[in-house]
Amino acid sequence: TVDAKSFLDVSGIVVRFGGLLAVNGLSMQVERGRIHALIGPNGAGKSTTFNCISCYYQPAQGRIVLDGEDITHHRPHQMAALGVARTFQNLELFGELTVRENALLGTHSHAARTAGMMLRRPGAEARDLVDHLLERVGLADHHDTLASNLDFGRQKMLELARALAIKPKLLLLDEPAAGLRNREIETLDRLLRELCERDGITVLLVEHVMQLVMAISDRITVMSFGEKIAEGTPEEVRGNPRVIDAYLGK
Ligand code: ADP
Ligand code: MG
């Protein structure tokens, strides 16, 4: 049975790549409207877990339930319709398209679920949404810039805007702060809190920037070698000897 409180329920997932156990029986629950972080050393299985939740991979074992619906064997293209958006550890923008065009691509997934059409000219509603989102991520002055001409921090913000254009219920962010300057991290901090508190979006993030993780997370799950080694509030996780030994002390 599914815990009524947990919005996302990952239970016992296993992912193998050949002989490598990338994720070994991971279970975690994410509550609705919270910011939940997934941390751990490189190679721990964090991105692979994200790929399962967004249905890019199907776990060999285990189950993933989103808002009461079993999504374990869904296809990636179905996830936008269920309100799941993600960004990637390595940027996945279209460099030859403008900022606005990239962001509009997100709304196509949204249009697909409201109008049942994949490719149509963006309506006024989509354009307004995108303009609003670009302003929120600080790209209001860059609508017509080619994505490839943005600096790195702005490219990351554009990826976030495109994910938000899906109007997600669950936002999966894979290392959103990596490579950002301090001031950009502060902007991200503020934006993520706002998305959660004002827009009611549930955020699950993989992140190495501990200053951000410890400041904004309601709950943290720690992975090492494919397994969960700790879970709790930032205070609990920060002081956990296993976490210090496997990750934070490094
Ligand atoms: P993290 O995001 O925590 O750094 P990953 O989930 O990317 O870790 O990787 C977990 C383990 O699985 C690593 O040992 C990695 O090398 C391996 N791995 C990830 N993706 C693949 C893949 N597509 N094929 C083979 N091995 C992979
Ligand atoms: Mg990763």
Image (cartoon, helix red, strand yellow):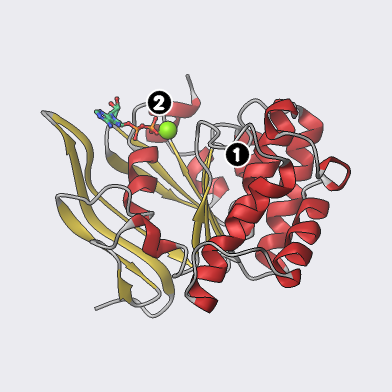
Q: Amino acid at mark 1?
A: Pro
Mark 1 closeness class: few <14, some 14–19, many ≥20 residues within 10 Å: many
Quarter containing the N terminus? bottom left
Where is mark 1, residue-wise? 176
Instruction: Judge from the rendering whether residue 67 lies leftward or rightward of residue 163; answer left or right.
Output: left
- Indicate the secondary structure of the residue bearing disc 2: loop
* Separation (CA) of disc 1 from disc 2: 15 Å
Q: Position of residue 231 (x, y in %)?
A: 41, 50
Mark 2 within 8 Å of ligand 1, using the beta carbon: yes
Instruction: Judge from the rendering whether residue 64 lies leftward or rightward of residue 181; answer left or right.
Output: left
Where 69 falls versus 213 (above or below)?
below
Residue drawn at x 38%, y 64% is 78
Residue drawn at x 58%, y 37% is 93
Where 119 falls versus 114 (above or below)?
above
Q: Nearer the viewer, mark 1 or mark 2?
A: 1
Can residue 141 be spotted in the picture? yes
Residue in the foreground of this view, choosing between 145 and 46 = 145
Where is mark 2, residue-wise? 42
Q: Position of residue 46 (x, y in %)?
A: 38, 39
Can residue 161 be spotted in the picture? no
Instruction: Judge from the rendering whether residue 183 lies leftward or rightward of residue 171; answer left or right.
Output: right
Residue in the foreground of this view, choosing between 60 and 216 = 60
Q: Position of residue 76 (x, y in %)?
A: 36, 55
